[in-house]
Image (cartoon, rainbow, N blue to C red):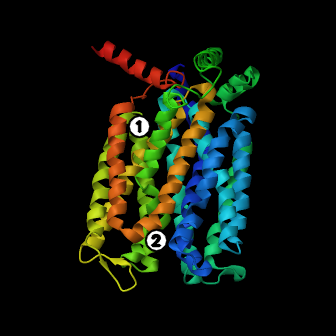
Amino acid sequence: MSDTASSPKTNAKVIGLAVAGAVGGFLFGFDSSVVNGAVDAVQGDFTLSATLIGLAVASALIGCAIGAYFAGRIADRWGRIPAMLVGSVLFLASAIGAGLAFGVWDLVVWRVIGGLGIGIASVIAPAYIAEISPKALRGRLASLQQLAITVGIFAALLSDTLFADAAGKANATFWFGLEAWRWMFLAGAVPAVIYGVIAIALPESPRFLVLKKRDADVKRIFARIWPNEDVDKAISSIRKAIEEDEQSSKKGALRGTALGLKPIIWVGIVLSIFQQFVGINVIFYYSTTLWRSVGFQEKDSFTISVITSVTNIVVTFIAIALVDKVGRRPILLVGSAGMTVSLATMAIAFSQAHFTSSGTPSLPGAWGPVALVAANVFVVSFGASWGPIVWVLLGEMFPTRIRARALGIAAAAQWIANFIVTITFPPLASVSLVLTYGLYALMALLSFLFVSRFIPETKGMSLEDANGLKSHRQTVRDRQKVAA
C-alpha cells in the first residue's frame, strides 16, 4: 500500500479509530486490576484460604481464556464490531453481578462472565487496530492497546483507592449500605457502557469486509480513513493475500506439522506465555497485599500501587515512540534483560526478610526500598517492551484469513498463563518469595533467549507482507541480501 495514507488528515482519522478500538484494552486493564484493592476485604468478609482467594482473583482469567479462544470465531463470522458489542454486554453484567455477590462462588461466576467479555476484547482490539492502520503507523497504533490497558489499570487502582479512602477502609460500609469493595467492582459498569457505545459508532474492518466480498462497503470506509489511498489497489492487495493464505493454509486451517499447529501460531503462543510468566500481573493483582506484608500501611500500599500504575502508563509512551523507529525485536531484548535483573534483585531482597509472629515477611533496613525500586524497574522494563510490543506482533504476524482465530488462540494461551501465575502466587509466596521471584527472573531470562532465536524484525512491512513466520524470515533474508 502506498505511503500516501500517512498524510496528517488521514493520520488523525486513523488514530481516532485506533484509540476508539483500544477502549477494549481499557476494560482489559480495569478488570485485571480492580480486584487488587478488594482482595483483603473479600478474603476477610468470606473467610477465604490463600488458595480460595487466589481462585477468586484468578477466576476471571478462566473466562478470559475461553472468551479469547472463541473471539476469533465470532469476529470471522459476524465481524469485529459485533464481537466488541458482545464483550461490552458481558463485562457490564459482570460488574453489576460481582458488586452484588453474596458469596465467593457467586463472585467467581460473575468474574468468569466478565472474563469472557475481556477475553473477547483482548483479541478484537489488536486485530481491529492492525487492520485499519497504514504500515507506517501500525506499530505505534497497535501499541495503543497496551496503553489503554495501562490506563485501565490506573483507573481501577485509583478508583479502588478513592472508594477505600472515602469509606475508611475497603471492607467498610459505603453508599446504600454496600461495602466499599463492592463499589470497586460496580464502577466497571461505566467503561463497559462506554465501550458498547463506541463500538456501535466504529466502521467495520476493511480486511474483514474484503474477506466477505463486500467491496462497496470497503470503498466507503477507505474513502473515510485512507482518502489518498488507491482503493482498488488496496483491495486487490488484501484479496491477493487472502487467496495466498487460502492456498498455503488449506483454506484458513490452523493445523500444521508442529504439534498440530502452524509454527507461526506456536510462536504467538510462546510469546503470550512469556509475557505472563514473568509475573507482571502479580504486581497489579496483589501489590497492595504484597506491600502491606512488608511493612507498609493499607493507605500507603494503595498509594504505591497507584504510583506503579502511573509509571506503567508513562513508560508505555516510550514503546509507542520507538516501536516504528527502533523495531520490535531490539525493544523486546532490552526489556527481557531489564526484567531479569530487576526480578533477581527482588528475589535477593526477599531473601533478607524476617518473619513476624503471624508469619508475614518484613524487610529490614534498606531492603524494603530496594524491593520497591526493583519492582518499579521491573514495571518500567515490562511496560516499555513486552507489554505493548507483544500485542503489536500478535496483531501483525498472522495471515489475514486466520488472523482473528490465531490471535484468539495466542490470547487464550496468554490468559491461561496469567491464570496459572495468579492462582499460584499466594501459595508460592506463603512458601518462599525468594523462590517465587526467582522463577519469574528465570522466565525473563528464557524470554530473552526465545526472542533471540525465533523473533525476526517486522518494522516497516505492510500487514500483508508481515503474514506468517516464513514471510518474516524470507523478508529478513531479502533485506540482508540487499544490504550486502
Q: Quick check: marks 1 and 2 in contact, CB under 8 Å?
A: no
Q: Provide residue 293's location: percent of width, then percent of height.
A: 40, 76
Between 349 and 183, the residue placed more toward the observer is 349
Residue at image location 55% in from the left, 70% down from the top: 53
- Label 1 to label 2, Cα distance in Å? 32 Å
Q: In this orientation, does residue 218 appear? A: yes
Between 375 and 165, the residue placed more toward the observer is 375
Query: Which image quarter is the N terminus in?
Result: top right
Q: Quadrant of residue 228?
A: top right
Identify residue type, mark 1: Val
Q: Secondary structure at mark 2?
A: helix
Identify residue type, mark 2: Thr
Between 145 and 39, the residue placed more toward the observer is 39
Q: Is residue 232 above or below residue 208?
A: above
Horizontal relation, residue 314 to residue 206: left or right:
left
Q: Secondary structure at mark 1?
A: loop
Residue at image location 46% in from the left, 67% down from the top: 426
Horizontal relation, residue 46 to residue 153: left or right:
right
Query: Which image quarter is the C terminus in?
Result: top left
Residue at image location 54% in from the left, 30% down from the top: 261
Task: Provide the residue designation for mark 2.
Answer: 288
Q: Is residue 430 above or below residue 223?
A: below
Q: Which mark, residue 251? A: none
Tell me if mark 2 has few (under 14), some (14-19) or many (20+) residues whose alpha carbon lies within 10 angstroms of its own. many
- Foreground label between 1 and 2: 2
Task: Provide the residue designation for mark 1.
Answer: 323
Q: Quadrant of residue 208?
A: top right
* Comes first in the chain, label 1 or label 2: 2
Residue at image location 46% in from the left, 78% down from the top: 299
